[in-house]
Amino acid sequence: MAKGHSVCVYVGEALGRYGFGDEHPFGPERMGVFWDRMISQGLDAVVAVHDPVCAERADIERFHTPEYVDKVIRQSESGTGYLDYGDTPAFPGVYEAAAHVVGSAVDAARQLMDQQCRHTFIPIAGLHHARRNVAGGFCVFNDCGVVIEMLRSEYGLKRVAYVDIDAHHGDGVFYGFEEDPDLLFADIHEDGRYLYPGTGAADESGRGLAKGTKLNIPMPPGADDDQFLVAWQRVEDYLRAGRPEFIILQCGADSVRGDPITHMCYTPAAHAHAATRLAGIANEFCDGRLLALGGGGYNHQNIALAWTAVVRSLLDAA
């Protein structure tokens, strides 16, 4: 049992600044609606609340190229242009906002490794589309990839597990570690034939020495909780066979029914189930080390319900 708090949650103005304006799907209110729900449910009083942390550039460059980091800094100063091919606009201060997402995720992982908490949750994080050298899908820096690299270089871990239930395929993480046989990757997402980024087919299972080591499960549009539970059992079997040392959960709420830019039909019970079961696996194999990241979600009610369901499940499992 960890010597610190059971569940740590990172919230604060610096995280809330990661967003692209009121008219953009990834707007500025996402953290606030989650935290309001946490307060109304009394969950704020039973978690350890941590302030956001700004990443050092050296941490960001664990995953991203220096040339790309330079580009983000330049466009953060000018506040103009796109950081990818048209989805992820720059704005004044975007570097600092994105650096707080990365820094909070890295700090949370270190808290877990140092046994200061058992499970953690960060609502504005899980930016899984950013590649090593370019942004993508509203994601400037890939905090998931940075954490994986940090755990390996700083703590010597090998078998890190990345689990993703966001409606969109976690392409930045997948292709960032596609040839890495030690990175456990399991992603349940809407079929890429119908949704950005168009990747994550079932036969994408890794390349080279890693061929056959990754698990992509594309789901049909309209997939519900029953279909999710069938797919989820495959994830559990895969993880238990891999015996992870640390688990990252990207629990995007855009797979819940009613999201404006996806076509999935889960309820928040799917997110609660995933968090509960992963916490059990983390308790069995990883001394509880489970880092949950909010990911996508563009219906505010779904964000509030799904993410608080995840936090409640983590509390119950701790």
Image: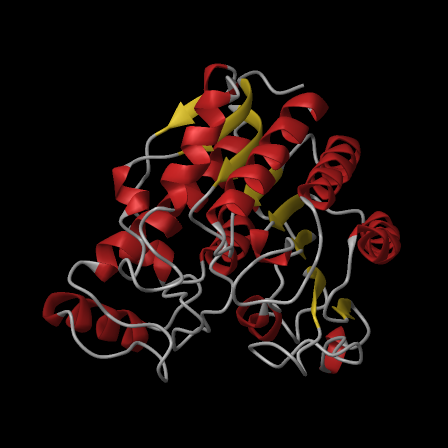
Q: Residue at x 58, y 48 (%)?
A: 156
Residue 106 at what x, y percent from top left? 43, 45
Residue 266 at what x, y percent from top left? 71, 52
Q: Is residue 255 above or below residue 85?
A: above
Specify the color scheme.
Answer: secondary structure
Please name whichever residue, 85 or 23, is drawn nearer the observer in this view of the structure. Answer: 23
Residue 220 at what x, y percent from top left? 77, 71
Please name whichever residue, 49 or 174, is drawn nearer the observer in this view of the structure. Answer: 49
Q: Quadrant of residue 314?
A: top right
Image-based side of 121 in relation to 92, left or right: right
Q: Residue at x 65, y 67 (%)?
A: 263
Residue 252 at what x, y percent from top left? 57, 53
Q: Quadrant of residue 292?
A: top right
Image-based side of 247 in relation to 117, left or right: right
Going by the picture, which residue comes out furthest to the left? 78
Q: Is residue 80 above or below residue 258?
A: below
Residue 293 visible in the current orientation = no
Q: Residue at x 39, y 59 (%)?
A: 26
Q: Residue at x 73, y 45 (%)?
A: 270
Q: Is residue 47 above or below residue 276?
A: above
Residue 107 visible in the current orientation = yes
Q: Quadrant of the N terminus?
A: top right
Q: Quadrant of the C terminus?
A: top right
Image-based side of 213 in relation to 134, left or right: right
How many marks on residues?
A: 0
